[in-house]
Image (tube, rainbow, N blue to C red):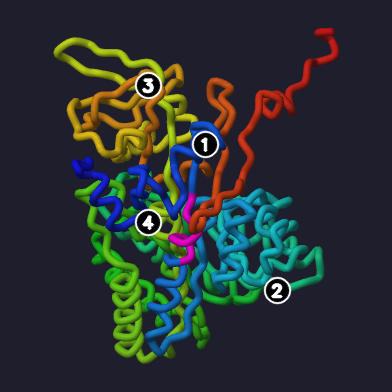
Amino acid sequence: MIVQDITISQIKRSGFSINESGILEFDQCNLVELAKKYDTPCYIFSENIIRKKCREYVNAFSGRNVDFEILYAGKAFLVKAICSILKEEGLSLDVSSGGELYTALSAGFPPDKIFFHGNNKSQEEIEFAIKEKVGTMIVDSEYELDLVSKITESLNTKTGIILRVTPGIDTHTHQYIQTGQVDSKFGISIDRVPDFMKKVLSTKNIVYKGLHCHLGSQIFDLSPYVLAVREMVKLIRKIKDLGGIDTLKLNLGGGLGAKYTRSDSPPSIENFVNLIVNNVENEVRKNNLIIPKILVEPGRSIVAEAGITLYTIGTIKEIPRIRKYLIVDGGMADNPRPILYDAKYEAVLVNKINNPPKEMVTIGGKCCESGDILIKDLNLPSTSPGDLLLVFTTGAYHYSMSSNYNRLPRPAVVLVNQGKDNVMVKRETYTDIVRNDTIPEWFK
């Protein structure tokens, strides 16, 4: 049986299989039948892969003699069902907006295990978090420290904070997903933190819990983490010397990459965790400090490969000797990453999974933008309108970044598990699109 090369590599790593009828399955669910049941475009997530990734982080840390906490980065993909999975797997959660916080709380996620990020939290968001007894505020600036202090005082309560530090380290990834370099909208420059701490320690209603840094996203080279640990532990030593205060938590962010294409080779979760722990232990020992609780914030590395997207091919346009376009029923509205970051993907035809590749094509979206191209130069079998296209590794930053551009309804989000399937998010309708529209009374 001849199978497209990409399929073989994906089956080996991502929960795919071909059933006795020659149909491609994901987590034992027939993808052709799922497309019929839920229509396309459609996001599909494997519950087993999500749980497996969560447990890889827990097991990797559990094998080391350190105190740790794993915070899932909600911005990657956050809906109620995901919150329920995280709660069952014992993970904590970081949120970066009032909407993400509301989602977590509405799913019954414990507020004391929520960390509230964001570089411009509003007064309303901070009040909401404090009133709901959210565990920790990640303070991003002096302005925010003053705001948190003012709100906690007005509510006659205290709140724990972690300071987000910009360590000045370049990860050599796309500039739009770097966050640890000197020129960043996030965090407090590392050289300013010692003076900043004087204000933190003298501010009423604020409890200093630790430090945070985040280098960026889709990181394959782990060497920047070695530098980050070194600089952050030096900073912990300075804080200790300044006020005799121990830093009890060190949050090193997330950023571990995921496999999008065959050429991608991300480090394993175990290697990532071991590198972090080894370097924290070494640097703490050098600086004669107590070892802090180690926190990490994985998002993409938990859900990216757990998610796929199904599309139906419609228009086929061939420009002789130049390019052949296959236009799908989605595009940049459900996956803005190619047009934002030049993100690369791989895909197969589900209903022709046993056919050999015969032509080089480009997958275009249906949005009214020339840049709405999902995949360039993809080898596929001979294609016809109505064929079912599967795009791999779409679990992170797809649904969460989706839009109603061109008034397109957002796709359904489906969870699969060993042959079972159910909706996590209903497909939007045209009625949903206009539900908040109003017509000014003077137009009537």
Which residue lies at the image location 38% right of the left edge and 73% below the top edge? Answer: 232
Badge 4, how many Cα within 10 Å: few under 14, some, many 20+? some
Q: Residue at x 54, y 20 (%)?
A: 406
Callout 3 amino acid: Ile
Where does the image place residue 90, in percent across and percent down from the top left?
Answer: 56, 73
Q: Amino acid at mark 1?
A: Ser
Judged by depth in the image, the label closer to the viewer, 2 or 4, is: 4
Residue 94 location in percent, x, y?
56, 61
Quarter containing the C terminus:
top right
Amino acid marked by disc 2: Lys
Is tag 2's residue or tag 4's residue first in the polypeptide sequence? 4
What is the magenta range? 45-51
**Quick one: 65 or 192, which is closer to the camera?**
65
Mainly helix, strand or loop, the magenta region? helix
Task: Give amino acid for label 4.
Answer: Gly
Where does the image place residue 95, in percent across and percent down from the top left?
Answer: 58, 57
SS at mark 4? loop
Mark 3 lies on residue: 327
On the image, numbered disc 4 is attached to which residue?
15
Q: Please, is residue 300 above or below residue 51 in the view? A: above
Q: Earlier in the sequence, mark 3 or mark 2?
A: 2
